[in-house]
Amino acid sequence: MHTRPLTIDGAWEFTPRCFSDDRGVFLEWFKAEVFADTVGHPLVIAQANQSVSARGVLRGLHYAAVPPSQAKYVYCPKGAVLDVVVDIRVGSSTFGEWDAVQLDDVDRRAVYLSEGLGHAFMSLADGSAVTYLCSTGYNPGGEFGTHPLDAELGLPWAGDIEPILSEKDAAAPTLRQAESLGSLPTFADCERFYATLRQ
């Protein structure tokens, strides 16, 4: 498995080796040892989620309060999505910046994003499935979002696809509004939390 850090500190891309023949394909899309060697701590899996989306569905930009927040290892077993990680940690040197990776059933990459980072994706094909390994369970009182079409963020959504948002995501504040509301995690709180994971 090949690993690559994204431009946002705390996020990585994982690309597995795929073995194909006339029967189909085999791959290992998550390896605990490779993950721990790359990230610096193991991934404790508390919950596994899956979404299936029509072309154009835009989910996000979601994040959770730190601590404990929710780290995610994201994989697309069917279809294709553009997966985006945004640094929403107030005080980070890359606050408001993003990186994007296409996840699909061809290259079969996965993306890991640490606690405190924002996450969104757009489905590029009907029936795109996304599987998430999550470090914590769903916590409705600690879940937040910012608007995925925030012009100041300028996220790289496909210009030829009309985005389809949930009512909740469409009503989310911009990043600057969320910052003024005090709902964003701080880089200092995230760093302290990451240190506990590495112990």
Image: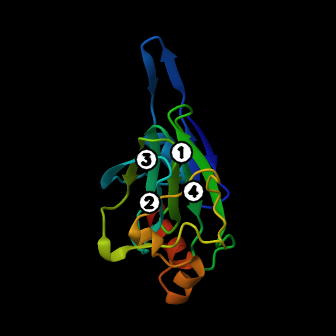
Which kind of residue does numbered mark 3 sit on?
Answer: Ala
In the rendered structure, are the residues bearing label 2 and label 1 in contact, judged by CB atoms less than 8 Å apart?
Answer: no
Q: Nearer the viewer, mark 2 or mark 3?
A: 3
Disc 1 residue type? Leu
In this figure, which residue is indicated by the disc labeled 1?
124
Residue under numbered circle 4: 84
Mark 4 vs 2, N-terminal side: 2
On screen, 159 above or below 30?
below
**Which amino acid type corresponds to the residue marked 4 in the rendered image?**
Val
Residue 11 in sight in this render: yes
- The CA span between labels 2 and 3 is 25 Å
Residue 10 seen in render: no
Residue 158 placement (x, y as % from top left): 62, 52
Q: Is residue 34 above or below residue 185?
A: above
Depth order, front residue of 151/39: 151
> Residue 39 or 183: which is nearer the viewer?
183
Question: Element at badge 1?
Answer: loop
Could you say which quadrant of the image residue 148 lies in?
Answer: bottom right
